[in-house]
Image (cartoon, grey):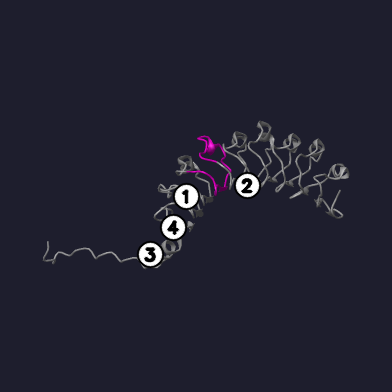
Amino acid sequence: LPLAAPGCLGDEQRLEVRGGRVPASLWAQRGLRKLYLSGAGLREVPAELGALRHLRTLALDGNELMEVPEALCRLPRLAYLYLGRNGLQALPPAFARLQSLRCLWLEGNFLARFPRALLGLPDLRSLQLGDNRLARLPAALPRMAGLRGLWLYGNRLEEFPPVLLRMAHLRLLDLDRNRIARFPDLTCLPALRLLSYDHNPVRQPPSVGDEVRLVGEGAQEFMEARQERLQKPPVPPLPPPTGDSPWL
């Protein structure tokens, strides 16, 4: 039963649920665009979810889901999906049907392999995979050409994944709390604007373009020195030698 009366604002529904049960009346609201069921103790989601075909935002984070509900993969307009802090170990192949998805939060699950279904979502822009168990990334990652933000903090990466050097459109990359001891030259990532590498066993900040903000050990000093270098006036060129020069 609802802990309190559901808050309904037009096409948005926020529910507080006790005992992992969602009121059956919810599934009759076919025009619903936003549904928040965070921390509701849900172990499964009824098949009726698939009837909410206008849904654009769905929050199921902080529940007890062991697998992605099949009905979820039948939501053609879903753009923002929050599945963090559940018990997920994989995503089903049908997840690739969510072609409208732009933002996916999967932090705090038990993913040991990068879900292959995500490679079929070229328009996904933000992917949150922090606090999982990933040790490597697939070579086909550049298929996700729309990706702009990638969060991989708190995983099991022991080296910088070389495939990331081919993600030319990536703007934000978070690799905090991994086991990466060496970073390659990252100036080949022209779109990169934020790199977080804190709590990795690196001895110095990675080499990045002048537009990139760094977060990690030694980053502040590095950026201050870079700013000072960039603000220095250029040294004027030496005048051309004349015929009277004693060195000619």
Q: CA distance from mark 3 to mark 2?
A: 40 Å
Helix, strand or loop status at disc 3: helix
Q: Residues in magenta?
A: 134-157
Helix, strand or loop status at disc 1: loop
Q: CA distance from mark 1 to mark 3?
A: 20 Å
Relative side of 223 to 30, left or right:
left
Query: x and y percent of residue 96 in the render?
Result: 66, 34
Q: Amino acid at mark 4?
A: Asp
Q: CA distance from mark 1 to mark 4?
A: 10 Å
**Residue found 38% across the figure and 64% down from its top:** 229
Residue underneath mark 4: 210
Q: Is residue 218 above or below residue 117?
A: below
**Viewer-nearest residue: 109 or 48:** 109
**Viewer-nearest residue: 34 or 54:** 34
Q: Nearer the viewer, mark 2 or mark 4?
A: 2
Residue underneath mark 2: 108
- Could you tell me if the residues under marks 2 and 1 are in contact, i.e. CB atoms within 8 Å? no
Q: Amino acid at mark 3?
A: Arg
- Could you tell me if the residues under marks 4 and 3 are in contact, i.e. CB atoms within 8 Å? no
**Residue found 55% across the figure and 36% down from its top:** 143
The count of marks equals 4
Residue underneath mark 3: 229
Which numbered marker is on residue 190?
Answer: 1
* Quadrant in the picture for residue 97: top right
Q: Amino acid at mark 2?
A: Gly
